Image (cartoon, helix red, strand yellow):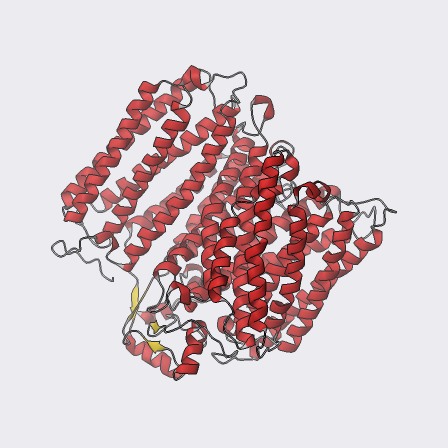
Amino acid sequence: MSNAQAQKSVLWDWLTTVDHKKIGIMYLVAGGFFFALGGLEAILMRIQLMFPNFDFVTAQTFNELLTMHGTTMIFLAAMPLLFGFMNYIVPLQIGARDVAFPFLNSLGFWLFLFGGVLLNLSWFLGGAPDAGWTAYVPLSSEYSGTGIDYYVLGLQISGLGTLIAGINFLVTIINMRAPGMSMMRMPLFTWSSFVASALILFAFPALTVGLLLLMLERLFGATYFAVDVGGNVVIWQHLFWIFGHPEVYILILPAFGIFSEVLSTFSKKRLFGYSAMVFATLIIGFLGFMVWAHHMFTVGIGPVANAIFAVATMAIAVPTGIKIFNWLFTMWGGRIQFTTANLFAIAFIPSFVMGGVTGIMLATSAANYQFHDTYFVVAHFHYVIIGGVVFGLFSGAFYWWPRMFGYKLNETLGKWFFWLFLFGFHLTFFVQHFIGLMGMPRRVASYLPGQGIDELNFVSTMGAFLMSVAFILLVVNVIVSVKNKSEADPWDGRTLEWAIPTPTPEYNFAQTPLVRELDALWYEKTHGNGKIKAAEPLDDIHMPNGSILPIFMSLGLFLASFGLIYQVHPVTIIGLAITLGAMFIRSIKEDHGYHIHKEDIKKEEGVG
Amino acid sequence: MAEAVKHEQTLPSHPEKATLEGKNKFLGFWFFLGGETVLFASLFGTYLGLRNGVADGPTSQDLFHLDLVFIMTMILLTSSLTSVFAMINMKKGNFKGLIIWMWATVFLGACFLGFEIYEFIVYVDYGLGFTTSAFASSFYTLVGTHGGHVLFGILWISTLLIRYRKAGITLTNAPKFYVASLYWHFIDVVWVFIFTVVYLMGV
């Protein structure tokens, strides 16, 4: 039967795949595309702000650009790119053949993709959303065009995909670990993915409700946010930030995990304070839910609430500080290799600490009245998101590229990329602290000359150009490096994902591995023969069948969204019928997968 | 866990968790219910924030009658009990008992839904439209989302019952029935909170 699998066309294979590795790669490709799109939007904004009173784009376009830049980068670039690594790497790190729910894994990806496409179609269909990525009411409920409808439905669909992915990772990590892989032997990337998934599970439903309310308000005349008939606009802010604050930890925790892997590998040392790192991750995850109102200090929730949320926010500095010191101690006395992946990890530490320090400043609720809605805030969150998440993505890309694609990215080009990006990043955002302190508000389409911010804005735009050049170098690197075939374990790795042949076989592990220690592969290299012991005899391997249904489920919701936006309810009904019909087929059709026979495995392993 | 093995004689005592797939479903569904909890908590929070925002429309005191809601509560609680009976029968390997008690659950769920639709019609007649006031919107959204969950549960369990009407208990369908009954209990628990927070605090 495995022969029948091999005869499928390439396109059909990718459209129907439930293989976590292929889905991971699709997440990376789609996320990379949206990352470029979000970057383009940023560049257009920076050009508009290059000179005072500049007339490059209209104010309306600027509003659409800033909204779509934020929304795209958070929901369609950073998270999917992290999901790409989580999908590909986590099952390998825990010695599993697949995720717990391969079908749902595919469904999560397609929901994300259709949601992202829906959101971006708004550019061509009456204008993109223009109320900021936070879409505060009543601006978004009463004063915005159809763009917000695309925002509401696009994010609803892709958010559903995210929630499904989160549940999938939680169950995978709890149930699918190889023998001997206890929770406290899991690599930090797996741990941080686990905690981030828990945050997704408990944070995203609040967004689901917020988006549902906004949709009902806009399309069906509900009145939650209409003050004249008893509504309350602050409810939106609460719902949004109850989701929105954990969201930033959903982004940063997997990046923390990547740094832990990279710093330990390239320092040739075991991660310092492993258990402290694990508990710090858990504490950050927990505190992430306790601080949402620090985004609302100036709304008027009162001095007591402000004080409580200020203290809770500052408390997060403690576990984060523990992590920073543990990374430093991991490098201390190590044999450090300055690969591109490691350079990003090392540069992350000071960059992220700067973002953390401005975070503490912003958490001081009294001072926050001065900083609120200025470029100081913009500088702060770009320091943590680029200096943290994006550096993590680049570090992870260079580190795991050989595992995922079978070739190594060019290190010379990589170092050019790193230095240009690092320099461009600090040039862009460091000056924005001062632009903000001088009083320039965020989200304005232009500014008047002679306020002492002209030169700083110009410098900031130059930095953005440098980052773009750097990104182009990365794309070039991906293309020209294809011929640099890599061996299975190019970095002298420590964890299980480096113990298997390259390219990674469809079934990952011919025999389920037996894990004897933290850093399982390193332990076998130093205490054994360098090969992972098997926990089972070689036998037939059960694999799930691919399915086209996830695309139909997502397509149905995509169509239904158009019906809702343009109030053509037959289309809504047809769309929902497609989705429910696909779910019905999935429910009544028992699919028991197929087996790869051990003779075929022996053949493949012999070659690999 | 390859073929649709049917062995009613040798079923393990927990057929819903006997396979890795079953274990995954069981755990994944608990996590899903955790997310659903946050979803309903958000809707409850919204309702509590807006329940006095009645504008010129009717208030909850004008509308709510505990006798109707009490009957609905009893029906839904009983439906949870019947789904427990179904699960007991499943663990005993009594397929017929499973099917009968599950149908009873579906029937009671449908009765509940009928009462809820009737209740909404009465309220609309009384002047509480969906768009009348913030109270009205948040009330219909909270209770309606719960009703939507009941409807989905009815359709889901009916699908399972028709699909497996002659299949016997297998290691494949036992987890499906089990998570469906978990879902049903969850809906029931949410209703207990709605009964308390919306109706008892609203009359």
Q: Can I make out residue A126 in this image?
A: yes
Give me the residue at 50% from left, 58% from top.
A281
* Residue drawn 67% across the image and 58% down it: A354
Q: Quadrant of the C terminus of chain A?
A: bottom left
Looking at the image, which is closer to me, B29 or A545? B29
Residue B89 sits above or below residue A470 on the image: above
Q: Position of residue A251 (x, y in %)?
A: 55, 55
From the top left corner, tell me how far across and down residue A409 is, in percent: 59, 74
| Residue A165: image location, x then y, percent | 44, 54
Please identify the residue farthest to the bottom as the structure is shown.
Answer: A529
The total of numbered circles placed on residues is 0
Q: Position of residue A265 (x, y in %)?
A: 53, 74
Residue most toward the right?
A450
Tell me if residue A501 can be seen. Answer: no
Above-or-below relation of A240 to A259: above
Tell whether A425 sits left or right of A34.
right
Question: Which residue is nearer to you in this view: A603 or A302?
Answer: A302
The residue that appears at 48% across and 66% down in the rendered structure is: A274
Image position of A513 (left or right of A123): left
Above or below, comparing residue A489 to residue A437 in the picture: below
Q: Quadrant of the N terminus of chain A?
A: bottom left
> Residue at position x 69%, y 43% from top?
A368
What is the quadrant of residue B186 in the picture? top left
Q: Quadrant of residue A63?
A: top right
